[in-house]
């Protein structure tokens, strides 16, 4: 069975083909038109998706070495995301499915991140078996979930304010870095001292309050943001410039150690033996390394998709559609799915609301 996946929820235009459960192609175009704006400009994102979507979908089909008529199912992100951006990919995909008379499967983008460790390219495939604790860390979300083999899941923790990706991007912006600052902080941190400055790690055993939050599965990064701002205001620009790698490494350590502590605690306290990390921040090299050491120490198996599947991509959209169909979902010839902006609007698992 060949599934075409389409992803346009933010600033990546992507199309992928999964055939026989494996990735046959995954074409991703990252938009450059937002440079200098300090973030993604929604209207520009929609226009860029519109300009590229036909060519990207064609490229994915060609790279998979098939024709459009050999597609069996069309899947696309229906949300959450920038509503205009989602609408472009969703309308295109439903139009194509209607024209080809194929079933259409709408996919929740954040659920696609959660299930991205199931992306199968052959050699590198390492999907979790049995229940696993999923840490999903992206530009807009930070979630801890317990996921069952039947694809049901329960969100056990979430950020109370900023997402981990936002914490990287916003503190990076304060350091004068371009959006998205996460990859740049990762790069700078390689030559910095992570113990140069102790930034706060909220709701953990390292909290700078008298309470020990060990066991709490929620996250908070707004205090880190304020702390970085105050730190930068207190130090002369020349000091900051000279110690940029040290400050970046210290910020990164504060974010990563919170993510690792809470994920490993959640697995250990529930006697779950597998852990996964997904979403754009899972590309972070310190997070990968620190999570691996912590999992090894606790005897947990770690599943992280290859870095190219951490940030937004359509392979994860087609993969989740394929997983749902393999678990008994009946594909429908319906082409009237509307886009939605929030994860909760169409989450299929149990979500504990704030
Ligand atoms: N190496 C890295 N280190 C830290 N952060 C990173 C790295 N690479 C990417 N990121 C961060 O990942 C985020 C983008 O991830 P992703 O594309 O999954 O998010 P999104 O799609 O915008 O949000 P969502 O999935 O919540 O809708 C950005 O905040 C970016 O800074
Ligand atoms: Mg994403």
Image (cartoon, rainbow, N blue to C red):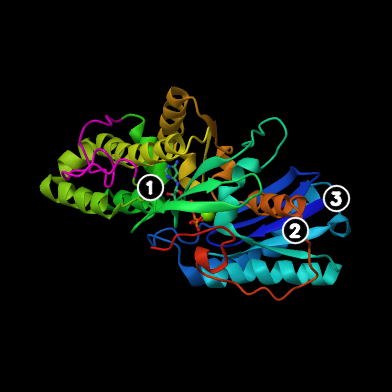
Instruction: Assign the magenta stretch its main secondary structure.
Output: loop
Instruction: Determine whether 137 is above or below 288 in the image.
Output: below
Q: Which residue is mark 1?
A: 217
The answer to which of 267 and 160 lies nearer the viewer is 267
Q: Which residue is mark 3?
A: 66
Q: Secondary structure at mark 3?
A: loop
Q: Indicate which disc residue 90 carries.
A: none
Q: Earlier in the sequence, mark 2 or mark 3?
A: 3
Coordinates of residue 320 in the picture (x, y in percent): 67, 52
Disc 1 or disc 3, which is closer to the eye? 1
Residue 180 visible in rendering: no
Relative to residue 334, is residue 192 drawn left or right?
A: left
Coordinates of residue 179 in the picture (x, y in percent): 40, 54
Q: Indicate which disc residue 329 carries.
A: 2
Q: Secondary structure at mark 1?
A: loop
| Callout 2 touching callout 3 (CB < 8 Å) | no
């Amino acid at each position: 069975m060949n599934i075409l996946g389409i992803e346009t929820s933010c600033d990546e235009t992507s199309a992928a083909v999964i055939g026989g459960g494996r990735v046959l192609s995954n074409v991703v175009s990252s938009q450059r038109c937002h440079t200098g704006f300090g973030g993604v400009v929604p209207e520009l994102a929609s226009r860029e998706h519109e300009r590229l979507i036909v060519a990207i979908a064609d490229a994915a089909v060609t790279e998979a070495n098939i024709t459009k008529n050999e597609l069996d199912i069309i899947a696309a992100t229906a949300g959450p995301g920038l509503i205009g951006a989602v609408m472009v990919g969703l309308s295109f995909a439903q139009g194509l499915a209607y024209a080809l008379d194929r079933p259409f499967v709408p996919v929740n983008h954040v659920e696609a991140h959660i299930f991205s460790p199931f992306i199968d390219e052959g050699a590198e495939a390492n999907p979790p078996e049995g229940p696993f604790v999923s840490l999903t860390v992206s530009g807009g979300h930070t979630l801890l979930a317990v996921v069952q083999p039947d694809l049901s899941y329960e969100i056990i923790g979430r950020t109370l304010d900023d997402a981990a990706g936002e914490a990287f991007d916003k503190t990076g912006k304060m350091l004068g870095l371009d959006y998205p600052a996460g990859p740049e902080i990762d790069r700078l941190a390689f030559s910095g001292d992570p113990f140069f400055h102790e930034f706060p790690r909220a709701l953990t055993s390292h909290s700078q309050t008298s309470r020990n939050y060990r066991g709490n599965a929620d996250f908070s990064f707004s205090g880190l943001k304020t702390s970085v701002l105050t730190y930068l205001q207190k130090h002369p620009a020349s000091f900051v410039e000279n110690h940029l790698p040290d400050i970046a490494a210290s910020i990164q350590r504060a974010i990563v150690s919170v993510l690792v502590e809470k994920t490993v605690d959640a697995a250990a306290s529930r006697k779950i033996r597998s852990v996964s990390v997904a979403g754009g921040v899972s590309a972070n090299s310190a997070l990968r390394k620190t999570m691996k050491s912590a999992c090894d120490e606790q005897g947990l198996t770690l599943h992280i998709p290859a870095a190219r599947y951490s940030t937004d991509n359509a392979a994860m959209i087609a993969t989740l559609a394929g997983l749902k169909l393999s678990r008994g979902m009946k594909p429908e010839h319906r082409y009237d799915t509307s886009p939605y902006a929030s994860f909760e609007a169409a989450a299929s698992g149990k979500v504990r609301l704030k």
